[in-house]
Amino acid sequence: MEEIKERQKNIIEKTIERLSEPSLYKMIYMPGHGKPMPSISSLYEIIETARSILFPGFFGESKVQTHTLKYHIGKNVDWLYENLEEQIRRGICFGCPQKSSEECEKCKNRAPELASHFIEKLPELRNDLESDIQATYNGDPASNSPEEIIFSYPGIRAITNYRLAHELSNLGVPLLPRIITEMAHSDTGIDIHPEARIGENFVIDHGTGVVIGETCEIGKNVKLYQGVTLGAKSFPLDENGNPIKGVDRHPVVEDDVVIYAEATILGRVTIGSGSVIGGNVWLTRSVPPNSKILQQKAQTMNFKNGEGI
């Protein structure tokens, strides 16, 4: 028995020795500012708190009354500011090339400023989300109330994360926006890049499998069904064979467009206002306003004894 234990101990020690060899690792994050990376679990709490501020009573504390609303909002906004500031500071330090052992003054001063600007934008974000909820309710005969949509629809959950992340991205906060939209991606299967630009009254019906790329521009009153991809064609490469960043490579979808399930639209093409794109369509060219793009009709063929299948 003692011999077995000794053998197991040796195996563990040798494995730790091998895993601790720095040459094995191409990427190790070592904070150069005294700040660790942003915390995924803290960001989950931050987003849930923001959700409880934007939709009082639906998330977090469920016993909100009219006369306690201000207390509820004030308490959560205060908590949100304090915790978001810390995560913003970590995000700035993560991407900062300066490797000082002490936290740099730039990060110290910038984080509270960005957190307060974000808090300032919450009323506008709430208005945008209310328009998304109302548009979803108006367009879905299966929904019984806007409240049902707020509480349970994955499309609204993903759009909420996106609108919060997009605002952080607009403010120049690094890293956090992508983490926040990827949280919704994991929860709902809806992948929206935080830098995409999306207008009001936006609807994602059912949602699973929707992909919206970084440089997408989506107008007002647009509706996407499940599985829609607004993606890029092959990437332009630099002289070293690396993808060139910052190129507009995703579609522009103008106002009042409906794109049905599993449609794939690739490249910097424009879907003109008022257009309808049918299900399973593969589209790599622009279409003028009020277009209706549908799949070719299915062909009927006769086979004998399984031939041709």
Image (cartoon, grey):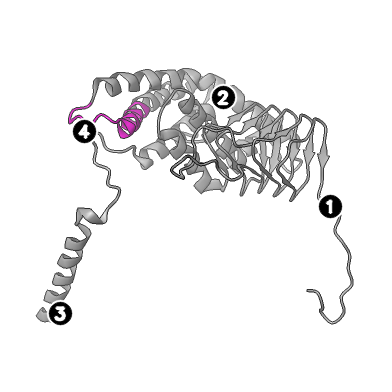
Q: Which residues are magenta?
A: 83-103
The residues tagged by marks 4 and 2 sit, at their Cα atoms, a distance apart of: 35 Å
Kindly report the secondary structure that dominates the magenta region of the rendered protein.
helix
Give amino acid for label 3.
Ile
Q: Secondary structure at mark 3?
A: helix
Q: Which mark, by number, is residue 126?
A: 2
Q: Within 10 Å of the Cα at label 3, are there few (<14), some (14-19), or many (20+) other Cα atoms?
A: few
Q: Secondary structure at mark 2?
A: helix
Q: Nearer the viewer, mark 3 or mark 1?
A: 1
Q: Identify the image quadrant of residue 298.
A: bottom right
Circle 1 is placed at which residue position?
Answer: 296
Q: Within 10 Å of the Cα at label 2, are there few (<14), some (14-19), or many (20+) other Cα atoms?
A: some
- Which circle's residue, 3 or 2, is located before the other in the chain? 3
Give amino acid for label 1.
Gln
* Residue occupying the point 77% across, 35% down: 287
Looking at the rendering, in which quadrant would you find the C terminus? bottom right
Q: Nearer the viewer, mark 4 or mark 2?
A: 4
Q: Within 10 Å of the Cα at label 4, are there few (<14), some (14-19), or many (20+) other Cα atoms?
A: some
| Residue 273 image point, x, y percent | 76, 29
Above or below, 309 against 135 in this view is below
Circle 4 is placed at which residue position?
Answer: 34
The residues tagged by marks 2 and 1 sit, at their Cα atoms, a distance apart of: 42 Å
Q: Identify the image quadrant of residue 276.
A: top right
- Is disc 1 in contact with disc 4, using a CB cutoff of under 8 Å? no
Circle 3 is placed at which residue position?
Answer: 4
